[in-house]
Amino acid sequence: MRVEIAMMRTPDGHGKLELSRFLAPPVVSDHRAAPVNALGYLRVMFAVEDLDDTVARLSKHGAQIVDQVVQYHDACRLCYVRAPDGLLIGLAEELG
């Protein structure tokens, strides 16, 4: 996988915006079943306070977790959920 990432902080210092562009693997035409790193895939990611609670609440509304929750060192936990209409939503919880 190859990706370019730009991370920005909002002027008030409370929000962050990540822009990413996957360069590889190849483009997938039907995004509803595409892997989370597919080229051209549209998704949004939110920072959450409690990842497990958020996933549980979204599951009650038909969202399904994609693969599993992963942890990146001591920095964050994140996962993707697929909404009933196929939209991919990323959720990230900062640790520490």
Image (cartoon, rainbow, N blue to C red):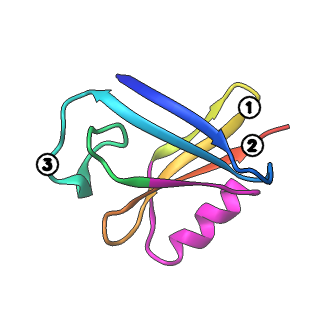
Q: What stretch is highlighted in magenta?
A: 44-66
**Label 3: which secondary element:** loop
Quadrant of the snapshot with the N terminus: top left
**Label 1: which secondary element:** loop
**Amino acid beneath label 2:** Glu
- What percent of the width, then of the height, locates residue 92? 63, 48
Category of crowding for the residue at label 2, using alpha-carbon neighbours closer than 10 angstroms: few (below 14), some (14–19), many (at least 20): some
Residue appearing at x 67%, y 55% in the figure: 51
Task: Find the residue positioned furthest to the left.
Answer: 29
Residue matched to label 2: 94
Residue matched to label 3: 29
Q: Which of 69 and 5 is in front in this view?
A: 5
Instruction: Specify whether residue 94 is painted magenta.
Output: no
**Amino acid beneath label 1:** Ala
Residue matched to label 1: 75
- What percent of the width, then of the height, locates residue 27? 18, 38
Task: Find the residue positioned furthest to the right.
Answer: 96
| Nearest to N terminus: mark 3 or mark 2 | 3
Whole-number angstrom distance, CA of label 3 to CA of label 1? 33 Å
- Tell me where residue 12 sits by quadrant: bottom right
